[in-house]
Amino acid sequence: MSIRTPFSMRLNEAERQVLEERAGAMPLAAYIKSVVLAEDAPRYRKRRTPPIAEQQLLAEVLARLGQSRTANNLNQIAKHLNQGTLVVDEELEADLKAALADVAWMRVTLMRALGVSS
């Protein structure tokens, strides 16, 4: 004997009226089950699983994010900029250029993995 679990569905008045009219003398729940569980009931596509190449690109971006302190470094730079204590020296300039390159690479790689043209 299988356990029956309840299923709830919200309908507005017009939707319920249409279903009741279509069900005729048949109980509404029985009618809904007969339509939904029918062999010729519409089937929707399964979710598309990304191809291996796309998964590899996404993994590369996640790995780079995990290894990088870019987000933290940019946050610290913004903090000093807002406080008026930012001193731009050669090291900071190099860090900013590296961060920009990382962000640009991530953007291009994510767009490619998602199949979006730039």
Image: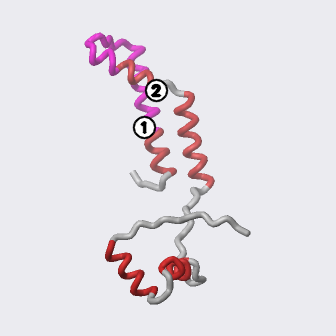
Element type at mark 1: helix
Residue at the extreme bottom: 25
Place residue 96 in its image quadrant: top left
CA separation, marks 1 and 2?
12 Å
Residue 94: which quarter of the image? top left
Badge 2 is on which residue? Answer: 70
- Give the percent coordinates (x, y) of residue 36: 53, 77
Q: Residue at x 39, y 86 (%)?
A: 21
Count numbered badges in the picture. 2
Assign a secondary structure to mark 2: helix
Q: Nearer the viewer, mark 1 or mark 2?
A: 2
Where does the image place residue 16, in percent across and percent down from the top left?
38, 76
Q: Which residues are magenta?
A: 78-105
Identify whether 13 is placed above or below 106: below
* Whole-percent x, y for residue 67 in the image: 56, 28
User: Which residue occupies the foreground of this view, 61 or 32?
Assistant: 32
Query: In the rendered structure, which disc, 1 or 2, sits on the residue that comes first in sequence?
Result: 2
Q: Residue at x 45, y 49 (%)?
A: 111
The residue that disc 1 covers is 104
Q: Residues within 10 Å of mark 2 (few under 14, many from 20)?
A: some
Q: Nearer the viewer, residue 18 or 95?
A: 18
Q: Which mark is residue 67?
A: none
Identity of the amino acid at label 2? Answer: Thr
Image position of 84 with respect to 43: above or below: above
Q: In what quadrant of the picture does the N terminus appear?
A: bottom right
Q: Main secondary structure of the magenta part?
A: helix
Residue 53 lies in the magenta stretch: no
11 vs 113, left or right, is left
**Residue at image coords 62%, 53%:** 52
* Left-right relation of 5 to 10: right
Identify residue type, mark 1. Answer: Ala
Percent position (x, y) of residue 22?
42, 87
